Amino acid sequence: MKKYSAIFLAAAILMTGCAENQNSSGEISSVLSDSTSSSSTNSTEVKQDSSFGVSDESSAEPLPFPLFGADNVQITFGDVTEMLDKEGNTLTKETLEDTKWYDIICGGFAYLAEPTISLNSVDDAELYDTETLLFGGAPEYTDTEYKRFKNGDKFGELTVKSAETTFSRIGYEEKDGVLTTEQIRAEGMCFAGMLRGCSAEFDGTVTMTGYMRVCVSEYGVEEGEVLFVPDKDSLVLPVMNFHVDRDTDTFNTAVWQWPVKDFAYATEYPTIRLGNINKGVDISGIPADGTSTKVSVTVTNISMFCDTHMSSFIDGEIVSVEAL
């Protein structure tokens, strides 16, 4: 069931606040888990991991406390590649307890969804209200179905090269330690919120039409950053922008509405960054004054992450771009 209240613009602005702290796709893991820098493994390696003494027969055994992903499927020991306590010490299946763990890392998969919405004030002018700066009928959230994508899985023209999912006890603590499952239930807190985030990198190249602009002065985004919004005919990138619905203990996807210099858009995609003109990115023929310009752009080296405690971003490298 979808929710159809308009999103507050202030919330959208706040979600960009950590952009300047994200430097490259190589730093995704450190963003999602402050206490580890473990690398992603492929899906075969995850299945063969025996660091917790998990046999083939017990690999599907759920963890001894509620922990589930954006697909609402419970996490099993076979999914896990590393478990850490608050001090960063490694836990095993035998030492794992309800209140002992702090980070649980699952290498080799991330949660992705099919995009459904991308509107803008040029192509969809009849839906845009210039007084409220909102698109009429655009939902605040969509019930987009997230699915687990493993290393090697394809999404359109893209193939998952590496992926990682992190769960965290951040926010589920008390003065003397972390809360027990019973305490969490008593407090009315949702277990879905323990999914801290995902990261993924992709092989492949995609071509999209949409609107490109160069950031001049936007909160949380570096000056000179090349930002792109695909139009409704170019929804070829996956969505990794899950939001926790704490009322139902499930996941949905936020639809952000952004007004920027006589141009506005509403989309499930987080900010799509395609490099910075001050760092060698060439977009000859595209205005660098913050104006949104219709373009056809080919992009490769795509990576993305979603951090439920911070912000979500998509990064890519421009192969070619042409103004339309």
Image (cartoon, rainbow, N blue to C red):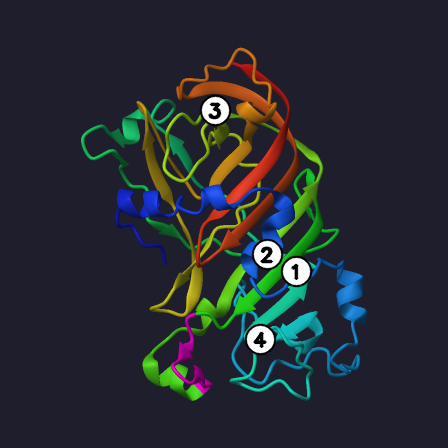
Query: At x 33% / y 69%, what residue is drawn?
Result: 247
> Mark 4 or mark 2, which is nearer to you?
4
Tag 3 or tag 4, which sits nearer the N-term? 4
Q: Residues within 10 Å of mark 3 (few under 14, many from 20)?
A: many
For the residues labelled 1 and 3, the Cα–Cα distance comes to: 33 Å
Point out the tag, 1 or 2, that comes first from the N-terminus.
Answer: 2
Badge 4 element: loop
In contact (CB < 8 Å): disc 1 and disc 2: yes
The residue that label 2 is drawn on is 30
Extreme-front residue of the structure: 87
Question: Which element carries disc 3, helix, strand or loop?
Answer: strand
* Mark 4 vs mark 3: in front: 4
Residues under labels 4 and 3: Cα distance?
Answer: 44 Å
- Which of the labelled discs sits on residue 212, or is there none? 3
Mark yes or no: residue 269 visible.
Answer: no
Q: Can you tell which quarter of the image residue 93 is in?
A: bottom right
Residue 145: image x %, image y %? 51, 56
Considering the numbered disc 1 on the image, is that residue within a helix, a strand or a loop?
Answer: loop
Residue under circle 1? Answer: 37
Residue 201, compared with residue 127, is above or below; it is below
Of pointers 1 and 3, the one earlier in the residue sequence: 1
